[in-house]
Image (spheres, rainbow, N blue to C red):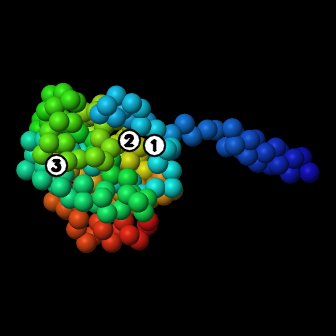
Amino acid sequence: MKRLIIISITIIMFFFKSSATTNNQKGFYDLEIESINGEIIKLKDYRDKVILIVNTASYCGFTKQYEDLQELWDKYKSKGLIVLGIPSDSFNQEKKTNSEVKEFCEVNFEINFPLTTITEVKGRDAHEIFKWAENNFGKSAIPKWNFHKILINKKGNVVGTYASFTKPTSNKIINKIEEIL
C-alpha cells in the first residue's frame, strides 16, 4: 500500500511539473516587424491569410523576381495571399537606406505589396521571424541567398520553403498557394 502511495505521489508530481512548465516560444502571429514606412506590421493582422515571406535585395541576380512577386500579389491578394518582402543586406546586395529600397521597388517594379525595413535574415542577429521559421521547420527555412521564400498557411505554420532559383510564379509555388488558400 505504501508503495502504491509513493508511486501515485510521484506520478502526480510529474503531472504538475509538466503542466507548470511553459513554452516561451512565440507563435508566428505573436511576431512583429517594422514596415519600410516605419509602421509596425503585426503578423496577427495576417491571421487566416496565406503568407509568402521573401528576403529581397536590390543588387541581386534574382532581383527581377520582384515582377513575379507583384504578379502573385495582384492575382491572389483578394483570395487571401499576403506577399511580404523583407529587404536584407545579409548577403551584401541591398541598398543602404529604406527610402532607397522603397524608391527602387516602386520605380523599377511598381511594388505595392508590403515591404519591411532592411532586416537581417540569417545568423545570430536574424529577425525573430527567421529564427521562428528555423525552429519550426528546420534548416531549409534559413535563407541561403536572396529571394529565399517561406510559405506560411492560414494557421501560421510553415508549409514550404523555396530556394532562390524557384521563381515565385513557378507551378510548384502557385499550386501550393492555391491548395492552401
Foreground disc of the pair 2, 3? 3
Amino acid on which the number 1 mark rests in the picture: Leu
Query: Which quarter of the figure is the C terminus placed in?
Result: bottom left
Q: Residues within 10 Å of mark 1 (few under 14, many from 20)?
A: some
Q: Residues within 10 Å of mark 2 (few under 14, many from 20)?
A: many
Residue 107 can be seen in this image: yes
Amino acid on which the number 3 mark rests in the picture: Phe
Residue displayed at 39% across by 30% down = 39
The residue that disc 3 covers is 109
Residue displayed at 31% across by 56% down = 73
Q: CA distance from mark 2 to mark 3?
A: 25 Å
Amino acid on which the number 2 mark rests in the picture: Ile
Q: CA distance from mark 3 to mark 1?
A: 25 Å
Q: CA distance from mark 1 to mark 2?
A: 10 Å
In terms of secondary structure, where does tag 1 sit? helix
In terms of secondary structure, where does tag 3 sit? helix
Query: Considering only order in the chain, which callout, 1 or 3, is on the residue closer to the N terminus?
Result: 1
Foreground disc of the pair 3, 1? 3
Q: Are marks 2 and 3 in contact (CB under 8 Å)?
A: no
The residue that disc 2 covers is 129
The residue that disc 1 covers is 43
Q: Residue 97 location, x and y as percent? A: 18, 27
